[in-house]
Image: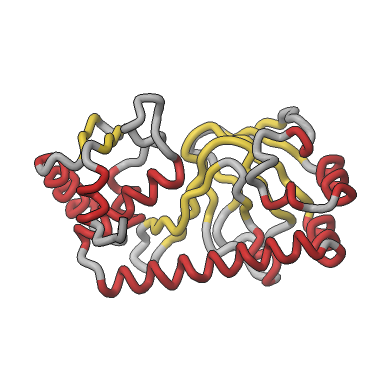
Amino acid sequence: MKTYCVVSDCQHCEQRFTSLLCRSSTEHLQQFNAQKVSSHYKKGQVIFNEGAYPFGIYCINSGKIKLSRQGDDGKEHITRLLRGGDLLGYRALLSGGRYNASAVVLEDTQVCFIPKELFVTALKNDATLSFEVMKLLSTDLQRAELKITHLAQKPVRERLAETLLFIKETYGYEQDGITLNVRLSREEIANLVGTATESTIRLLSEFRKDGLIDLDGKKISFLDMQGLVKTANLQD
């Protein structure tokens, strides 16, 4: 069950330099601040379910979230990983459709909910915000096209290395500077890669033997960044 909480106003939010909403005009930012509803979710809780209709958008104040959908095979398919400052639910809201994925909390997370009418009104009247949303939608499309291309052309080993690098870019390291700052199960990593869990387990073991990473339960540490980039077949 979610719990309501008190967070700082939008002008002093810790995500004010990263959140798209904070690029709104002062007037609209004040309106967001006055009408937002802040909630705290525990690990494993669902913020919204695939197939539901949106009543607004969510801005992540802190924490980590995955977007996942059920495939025809009944298995979970993770489409995105999100962090503080990211927005949730804007595509379904703007299209007038249903959510095409569920938002599930990976660790204790705090989000702010902005009602649909307020967000849409701001888009209509704030050119800067509208342009930022268009850029976000364009980035989403580019990311989706790239993933489709890689699924069709790249072998699983390269996709796994690329996925690990993507997780690092999303969540960064812990204080030791080498351990990924998120705990994902082997199944979740496999869902991100688009392969079987068994293949992911085998390849992670190979990466460990090759000295690319170290494994400690769900903890994954990078030992050879250049080696991972090379394995992913990416340009440095």
- In the rendered image, which quarter is residue 211 located in? top left
Name which residue lies at 54% across and 32% down: 108
Q: Is residue 100 visible?
A: yes
- How many numbered marks have been drawn onto this rendered protein structure? 0
Judged from this view, the residue extending furthest toward the left is 209
Choose between 233 and 189: the one closer to the eye.
Answer: 233
Judged from this view, the residue extending furthest toward the top is 175
Name which residue lies at 31% across and 48% down: 164
Choose between 126 and 116: the one closer to the eye.
Answer: 126
Q: In the displayed structure, does residue 85 sit left or right of residue 236? A: right
Q: Which quadrant of the rendered structure holds the C terminus?
A: bottom left
Q: Percent x, y for residue 88? A: 62, 53
Q: In the displayed structure, does residue 81 sit left or right of residue 90? A: left
Q: Percent x, y for residue 18? A: 63, 45
Name which residue lies at 24% across and 61% down: 233
Judged from this view, the residue extending furthest toward the right is 27
Q: Is residue 35 above or below residue 158?
A: above
Q: Is residue 77 above or below residue 64?
A: below
Choose between 82 and 174: the one closer to the eye.
Answer: 174
Q: In the displayed structure, does residue 4 sit left or right of residue 198? A: right
Q: Percent x, y for residue 25? A: 84, 52
| Protein image colouring | secondary structure
- In the rendered image, which quarter is residue 129 located in? bottom right
Q: Percent x, y for residue 58? A: 67, 49
Name which residue lies at 52% across and 59% down: 101
Q: In the displayed structure, does residue 20 sit left or right of residue 99? A: right
Q: Is residue 1 visible?
A: no
Choose between 59 and 26: the one closer to the eye.
Answer: 26
Q: Which quadrant of the rendered structure holds the N terminus?
A: top right
- In the rendered image, which quarter is residue 91 located in? bottom right
Q: Is residue 14 above or below residue 65?
A: above
